Image (cartoon, grey):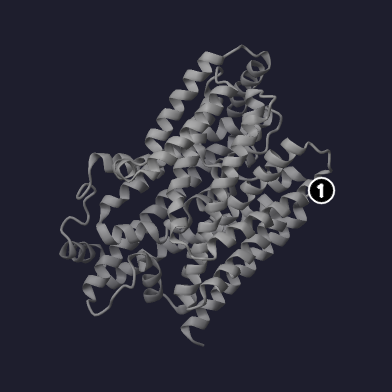
């Protein structure tokens, strides 16, 4: 059996497992809340790892190791920023959002929560936020499909379009039928696979490079400043990379996990699991890059085709071909977990926040579930069409969309949870300003190269939301009652 056959077998087994989970979840999905939010039944481990897997994508296994391999530890500031942002998100957003979304009309999406929390009757805020999610996530999903096609093309020599169709078909199948439960359960297993791969590759790689001491010496021989966090960086550059952490407060596919956990009590355990997973995974990604630098310095006759392939290359060097296939599956898992999470959130925005809000039909829950499945299929087809030309500019939209969501939704989410006086008008203008600033700033080379667009977008969105809310605030007994009830339940559940 050839090495490629072993690796392909591992990939096939992984995909079969994902489809089996989709079928299991399909059998457990009875209504729209089940399909869109898993019936608010997720345990802490599934919540934590599914949020992490949905968040990190292929960047964790390829982008970050590639950047550090190429330019050094200065690139690790983004990992530091993301860890801080994720921790604060779990600490300050997760418990309150879990309670508030249930208190406020049992909201199952971010747009429906905003509408219910701010008591807006015109549905303008809900529709606007639903459209933002639909627009950005369609391109986000498309970028993941591009990554899937490139993965099969580079790993097995398969035609790019064939690889794109394979990845798309499997992800769409388990997401379409199993809904949020399938997405969360598959993300949990994908998160475990990513974690194990990121720990095992650098650990076993150290045996090839002669241990920590020799590895460090080999790295210094390549570049004496490669291990410095500050070499080649600027203050503005560090601020820009650390500011990626601000994006967490507004990412719908991540914070929707907080709404789905069983109870507030379990958010503390989920936070510990999630942040532990994240720190160890990021350390593994950084260590993989550094071991790769040492290995190729010690073996000058070998060449690395691309810096971003250092994780895959080391996995194929240190492991049996079947295990190396599981390493490849970890890369695929990172891509697929993010696609599926974005698909289910986009589907919920299309049905719950646009169709139901505008059409106002009184169909049965089973009918809405089927509409949700059609929405998954529709978004997938549009995303696949966008990805068909292997357009590299789509991949660049990932950082752009991260900033867009972080700046438009982040300040609004935080203020709805912690400030009684935020108004629907303030939230709407804050979202608009955040999105517009990100678009203009990100599209202007001189500005975006100086400072990541999420920083001005987030700050201006926060200021506008507060100022407009103070100008338009009127006491609302129903809002006050829900705010007080949320605080009461939080205190009660934390006892």
The picture quadrant where one finds residue 267 is top right
- Please tell me which residue lies in front, 394 or 195: 394
- Measuring from the top left, give residue 38's x and y in whole percent: 69, 46
Left or right side of 256 for 235: left
**Residue at coordinates 48% horizontally, 69% vertically from top-left?**
151
- Measuring from the top left, give residue 245's x and y in whole percent: 41, 41
Total numbered labels? 1
Residue 85 visible in this rendered orientation of the protein = no
**Residue at coordinates 68% horizontally, 17% vertically from top-left?**
478
Disc 1 marks which residue? 367
The picture quadrant where one finds residue 455 is top left
Q: Quadrant of the C terminus?
A: top right
- Please tell me which residue lies in front, 472 or 291: 472
Left or right side of 341 for 60: left
- Measuring from the top left, give residue 50's x and y in whole percent: 56, 51
- Measuring from the top left, give residue 243's x and y in whole percent: 37, 39
Task: Single out the residue that lies furthest toward the top.
Answer: 475
- Mark 1 nearby-residue class (10 Å; few <14, some 14–19, many ≥20): few
**Residue at coordinates 24% horizontally, 67% vertically from top-left?**
294
Regarding mark 1 in the picture, which secondary structure is present there? helix
Left or right side of 78 for 128: right
**Residue at coordinates 30% horizontally, 45% vertically from top-left?**
449
Vertically, is 223 above or below 355? Answer: below
Vertically, is 63 above or below 264? Answer: below
The picture quadrant where one finds residue 162 is bottom right
Residue 54 visible in this rendered orientation of the protein = yes
């Amino acid at each position: 059996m050839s090495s490629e056959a072993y690796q392909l077998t591992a990939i096939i087994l992984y995909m079969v497992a994902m489809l089996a989970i989709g079928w299991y979840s399909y059998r457990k999905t009875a209504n729209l809340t089940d399909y869109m939010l898993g019936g608010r039944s997720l345990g802490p481990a599934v919540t934590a790892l599914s949020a992490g897997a949905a968040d990190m994508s292929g960047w964790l296994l390829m982008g970050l190791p590639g950047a550090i391999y190429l330019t050094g530890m200065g690139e690790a500031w983004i990992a530091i920023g993301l860890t801080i942002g994720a921790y604060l998100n779990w600490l300050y957003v997760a418990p309150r959002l879990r309670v508030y979304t249930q208190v406020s009309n049992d909201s199952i999406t971010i747009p429906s929560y905003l509408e219910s929390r701010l008591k807006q009757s015109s549905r303008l805020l809900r529709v606007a936020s639903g459209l933002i999610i639909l627009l950005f996530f369609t391109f986000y999903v498309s970028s993941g499909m591009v990554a899937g096609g490139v993965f099969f093309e580079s790993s097995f020599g398969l035609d790019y379009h064939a690889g794109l169709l394979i990845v798309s078909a499997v992800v769409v199948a388990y997401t379409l039928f199993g809904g949020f439960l399938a997405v969360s359960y598959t993300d949990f297993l994908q998160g475990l696979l990513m974690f194990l791969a990121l720990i095992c590759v650098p650990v076993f790689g150290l045996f090839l490079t002669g241990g920590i001491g020799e590895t460090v010496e080999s790295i210094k021989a390549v570049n004496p400043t490669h291990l410095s966090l500050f070499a080649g960086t600027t203050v503005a550059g560090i601020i820009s990379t650390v500011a990626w952490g601000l994006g967490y407060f507004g990412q719908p596919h991540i914070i929707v996990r907080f709404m789905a956990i069983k109870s507030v009590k379990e958010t503390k355990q989920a936070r510990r699991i999630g942040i532990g997973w994240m720190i160890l995974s990021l350390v593994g990604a950084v260590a993989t890059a550094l071991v790769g630098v040492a290995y190729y310095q010690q073996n000058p006759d070998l060449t690395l085709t691309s810096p971003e392939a250092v994780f895959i290359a080391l996995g194929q060097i240190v492991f049996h071909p079947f295990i190396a296939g599981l390493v490849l599956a970890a890369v695929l898992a990172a891509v697929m977990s993010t696609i599926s999470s974005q698909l289910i959130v986009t589907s919920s925005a299309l049905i719950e926040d646009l169709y139901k809000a505008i059409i106002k039909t009184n169909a049965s829950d089973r009918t809405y579930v089927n509409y949700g499945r059609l929405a998954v299929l529709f978004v997938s087809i549009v995303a696949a069409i966008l990805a068909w030309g292997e357009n590299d500019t789509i991949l660049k939209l990932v950082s752009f969309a991260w900033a867009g969501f972080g700046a438009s939704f982040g300040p609004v989410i935080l203020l709805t949870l912690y400030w009684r006086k935020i108004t629907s008008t303030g939230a709407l203008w804050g979202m608009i300003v955040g999105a517009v600033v990100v678009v203009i700033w990100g599209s202007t080379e001189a500005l975006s190269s100086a400072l990541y667009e999420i920083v001005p977008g987030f700050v201006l969105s926060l200021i506008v939301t507060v100022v407009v809310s103070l100008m338009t605030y009127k006491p609302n007994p129903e809002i006050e009652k829900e705010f007080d009830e949320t605080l009461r339940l939080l205190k009660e559940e934390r006892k």
